[in-house]
Amino acid sequence: MASQRKFFVGGNWKMNGNKASIDGIIQFLNAGPLDPNTEVVVSPPAIYMEYVRGKLDQKIGVAGQNCYKVEKGAFTGDISANMIKDIGCEWVILGHSERRNVFGESDQLIGEKVKYALSQGLKVIACIGEKIEEREAGKTEEVVYRQMQAIVDNVAPDQWANVVVAYEPVWAIGTGKTATPAQAQEVHQKLRAWVAKKVSEPVANSLRIVYGGSVSAANCKELGGQSDIDGSLVGGASLKPDFVQIVNATQ
Ligand code: PEP
C-alpha cells in the first residue's frame, strides 16, 4: 500500500443477517480495536442500514449495496442515493458482480448510477472484475478497462476523492479461491496505469483500488502489502469477528 492513500476496508454483508446477528457484528466492530489509519465502511442490507447507522461507532461508514440512478419515482423495490443520505449514510456500492451477473446490470446503467450517486454527494465503491472464462481467454484487461471506462465517463475531475474502485475477480467472490497477491497486484498496477493515461497521473496516484474475492484473516496481510492494493472489499468474512483482523491488516 502506498503511503499517500489511506487503507480502505469495506464489509459487504450482502443479503445476510437479522437484527440479532447484526447486533453481534455491531458489538465486535464497536469493540475493535480498529486501526485508526484504516477507513472502514460496512454495507448492510438496505432494510437494516438505518438500524446499523444508529448503533455503529460514527468512525465506521455505512454504505448501501446498490441504489438507482434517479431521486424518486415508480421504481418498485429500489432505493435512491437521496434516501441513503437521508438516513445519515454516506456511501454506496455500485456495480457489484452480483448486480452485474445475477441482476443483469450493464456497464452503462452502472455508469449512470455512479454519476447520480456522486452528484448527490454520496461516496461510491465502484466494483469491476472479470469472469473465469474471460480470464482464461486472456481478456481480463479488456474487460476491466471496459468496465472502468463506463465509470470514468461518469466521474467529474473534482469527484475522484469520493470514489474507491474495487477490483473483484468474479471467480474469487464467495468461492474461497483468492487471487494470489501477485495476480491481484498485476491487475491493480495495470488499472492504475490505465487511470493515469485516461484520467490523470494525480488521480491515478491518489485513487484507492481495493481487492475483493475471498479475503480472509489468513490472506489479508499479504494482499494488503502489495504496492497497488489499497485495502479490501470483504463479503463472507465481514460477518465474522475476523473482519477486525482484516481491517488491521497493515498493522
Ligand atoms: C464481495 O461480496 O464483494 C466479496 C468479495 O465476497 P467474498 O469476500 O465472500 O468473496
Image: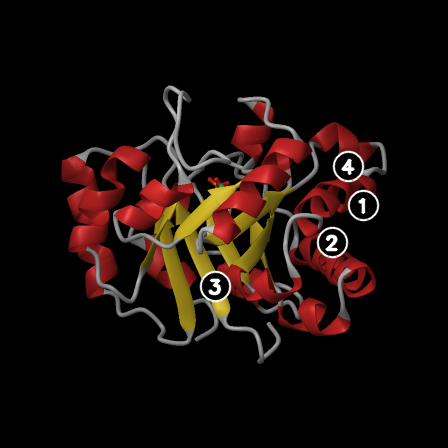
Dot 4 falls on a residue whose secondary structure is: helix
The amino acid type found where label 1 is placed reads Glu
Tag 4 residue:
135
* Marked residue nearer the N-terminal end (2 or 4): 4
Residue 95 is situated, as x and y percent measured from the top left of the image, at 56, 38
The amino acid type found where label 2 is placed reads Val
Which colour assignment does the render follow?
secondary structure
- Disc number at residue 187? 2
The image quadrant where one finds the C terminus is bottom left
Dot 2 falls on a residue whose secondary structure is: helix
The reply to whether dot 4 and dot 3 touch (C-beta < 8 Å) is no
Dot 3 falls on a residue whose secondary structure is: strand
Residue 5 is situated, as x and y percent measured from the top left of the image, at 56, 74
Q: CA distance from mark 4 to mark 3?
A: 26 Å
Residue drawn at (37%, 55%) of the image: 90
Residue drawn at (70%, 37%) of the image: 130
Tag 1 residue:
141
Residue 150 is situated, as x and y percent measured from the top left of the image, at 70, 42
Q: CA distance from mark 2 to mark 4?
A: 11 Å
The amino acid type found where label 4 is placed reads Arg
- Disc number at residue 8? 3
**Mark 2 or mark 3: which is in front?**
3
* Marked residue nearer the N-terminal end (1 or 3): 3
Position of 187 with respect to 60 (left or right) is right
Vertical side of 40 occupied by 67: above or below = above
Q: Residues within 10 Å of mark 3 (few under 14, many from 20)?
A: many
The answer to whether one can see residue 222 in this image is no
* Marked residue nearer the N-terminal end (2 or 3): 3
Vertical side of 205 occupied by 48: above or below = above
